[in-house]
Image: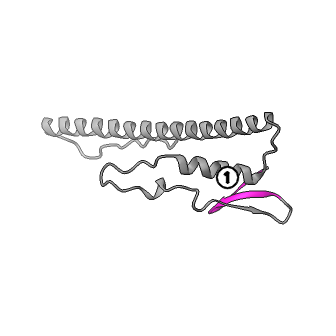
Amino acid sequence: MAQKRKVEVTTNIDDETDRVLYSVFRSAAGGLSHLYSQALNHHKVAFEAGQRHALEKLNEWMTVKHQEGTPVTTADISAYLQNELSSMSLPSNPLNGRQNEADLPLSSSLVQSQDQDGSAFCSRGSEMEIE
């Protein structure tokens, strides 16, 4: 996390009202900065929790398939992920009733490929390897 900057007042504030106003402003600015930092940290924690949940669901599905004696291929994993993504309801932006670009499903552009050395991967802009 970035270090906090300490701003020194170079001018003398003579008027008591100005001093109080400046003090209130500094306090509000510090509170807003703290609130923003908390929101960023909460967003990171929530994102990681969602990531962990998705991986746990995939692992659970693969374990069930393995227990059934069904081999899991990269095509099966890709199909499972596409099915999960398409079955999710997409939240809309409450301000204007439209979907955000970030909320669009990945399934439309999720492509399964194979590298020269035989490593399979799914890609959407960048490669994610699947072993």
| Image: 96 above or below 49 | below
Determine whether, in the image, residue 26 is placed left or right of residue 15: right
The residue that label 1 is drawn on is 79
Q: Residue at x 29, y 46 (%)?
A: 10
Secondary structure predominantly adopted by residues drawn in magenta: strand
| Image: 60 above or below 110 | above
- Residue 124: x and y in percent read 62, 60
Q: Tell me which colouring the rendered structure shows.
A: one colour
**Is residue 103 in the magenta section?**
no
Label 1: which secondary element: helix
Foreground of the two, 80 or 13: 80
Q: Residue at x 52, y 55 (%)?
A: 105
Res 56 → quadrant: top right
- Residue 116: x and y in percent read 84, 66
Q: Which residue is drawn at 45% across and 49% down?
A: 90
Magenta-tinted stretch = 119-130
Determine whether, in the image, residue 22 is placed left or right of residue 118: left
| Image: 126 above or below 71 | below
